[in-house]
């Protein structure tokens, strides 16, 4: 079935309409006559557009149109669906715009337009006060409205993802929201944090964000985004090699250590410190990253601060966490960092 019959208009008492995983290419305008619909699932079809009459479904609280081929934008009439709580439109590769305004969608809690081609977001999204999940990852955003920083004013936000977008920077209002949140962390944004002048700590999305790397004047990359084993991907590369993303443009040091409780990262501390110091002595900027910028690359930055400032693990950890609060090394790395503290203490006595 590629098209719903217009007789769907007779389903005037239907509240839950699930048409997912079909071959639907078109939805008739008559759907708008089913005014009691509360949940409408149209995901995993072949829809290129949605009926303009969707805006007549004023009782609708959930709309799922993910995994289709919707082009350009969602119907403007959706702005009339003031009871809408969940709007899911991910994986529509030709979708460039969501809505012109959000000011009437006061109950919207969940917005997922990941893996589309979104190029902009209207600032009126900042008027929403009930948002808990915002997924904008893997789109074509080159900038983001500062209004996003208002979304957690009622402490409702539990998840946000802006990764996979080539943004030079993140507005201070969003950074402030992340800093004050107990749920959202720096792993939600495709940029790194400066731990000390010239040393940045981040995840793989910062390492993939060429516009950010250029804006931050990065010259060296300390890459820990490997698996720690010899398994090859479909292109015959180890994970650490596959994540050496711009080898012709930056100086790389690859450290292939898995984020496990059996992994040994201590033997790499001195080598990484030397790499960082040489880069900084040349007035370079180092991005130290693993996958999330939480454990492996954080351990390297902590070890560097310990050696540079001759301070304890606890003090170095506090310094790094003050710049990137999501830092949390696994227990094995913590143990090895404390061992490194003893090693440094012995060196300094000589």
Image (tube, grey):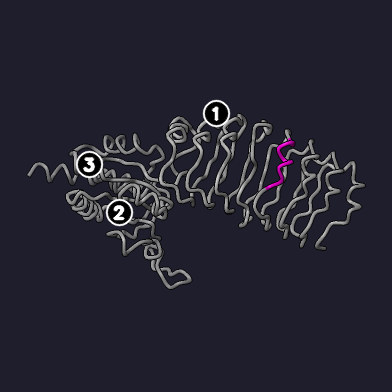
Q: In this view, does 90 lie to the left or right of 51?
A: left
Q: Where is residue 257, by image quadrant?
A: bottom left
Magenta-drawn segment = 74-81
Q: Distance between the residues labelled 2 and 3?
A: 15 Å
In this view, the mark in front (2 or 3)? 3
- In the image, farthest residue toward the bottom: 236
> Dot 3, how many residues are within 10 Å of its Cα: few (below 14), some (14-19), or many (20+)?
many
Q: Earlier in the sequence, mark 3 or mark 1?
A: 1
Q: Residue at x 75, y 49 (%)?
A: 41
Q: Mark 2 points at which residue?
A: 265
Q: State the residue at coordinates (57%, 45%).
A: 135
Q: Position of residue 287 (x, y in %)?
A: 32, 50
Spot the residue most to the top.
154
Q: Which of these two is toward me, 167 or 61?
A: 167
Residue underneath mark 1: 155
Say which residue label 3 marks: 306
Residue at left offset 83%, top offset 41%:
15
Looking at the rendered image, the quarter that the N terminus falls into is bottom right
| Residue 260 visible within the image | no
Rendered image quadrant of residue 106: top right
The x and y percentages for residue 164 are 49, 52
Q: Is residue 253 magenta?
A: no
Residue found at the far left of this picture? 350
The spot of residue 148 in percent (x, y) is 53, 35
Compare marks 2 and 3 and give the one earlier in the sequence.
Answer: 2
Q: Nearer the viewer, mark 1 or mark 2?
A: 1
CA distance separating discs 3 and 1: 35 Å
């Amino acid at each position: 079935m590629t098209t719903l019959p217009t007789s769907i208009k007779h389903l005037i008492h239907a509240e839950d309409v699930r048409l997912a995983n079909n071959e639907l290419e078109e939805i008739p305008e008559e759907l708008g006559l089913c005014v009691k619909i509360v949940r409408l699932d149209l995901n995993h079809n072949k829809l290129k557009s949605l009926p303009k009459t969707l805006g007549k479904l004023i009782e609708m609280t959930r709309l799922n149109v993910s995994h289709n081929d919707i082009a350009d934008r969602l119907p403007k009439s959706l702005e009339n669906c003031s009871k809408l709580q969940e709007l899911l439109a991910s994986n529509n590769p030709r979708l460039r715009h969501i809505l012109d305004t959000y000011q009437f969608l006061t109950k919207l809690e969940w917005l997922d337009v990941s893996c589309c081609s979104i190029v902009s977001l209207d600032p009126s999204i900042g008027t929403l006060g009930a948002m808990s999940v915002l997924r904008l990852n893997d789109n074509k955003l080159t900038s983001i409205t500062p209004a996003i920083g208002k979304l957690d004013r009622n402490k409702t936000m539990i998840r946000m993802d802006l990764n996979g977008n080539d943004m030079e920077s993140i507005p201070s209002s969003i950074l402030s929201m992340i800093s004050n949140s107990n749920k959202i962390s720096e792993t939600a944004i495709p940029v790194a944090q400066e731990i000390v002048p010239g040393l940045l700590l981040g995840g793989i999305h910062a390492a993939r964000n060429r516009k950010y790397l250029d804006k931050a004047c990065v010259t060296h990359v300390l890459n820990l985004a490997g698996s720690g084993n010899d398994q090859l991907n479909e292109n015959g590369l180890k994970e650490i090699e596959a994540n050496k993303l711009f080898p012709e443009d930056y100086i790389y040091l690859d450290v292939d250590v898995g984020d496990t409780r059996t992994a040994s990262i201590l033997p790499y501390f001195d080598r990484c410190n030397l790499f960082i110091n040489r880069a900084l002595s040349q007035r370079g900027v180092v991005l130290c990253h693993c996958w999330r910028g939480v454990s492996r690359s954080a351990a390297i930055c902590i070890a560097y601060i310990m050696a540079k400032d001759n301070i304890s693990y606890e003090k170095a950890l506090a310094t790094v966490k003050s710049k990137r609060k999501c830092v949390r090394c696994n227990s094995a790395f913590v143990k090895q960092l404390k061992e490194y503290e003893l090693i440094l203490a012995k060196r300094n006595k000589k």
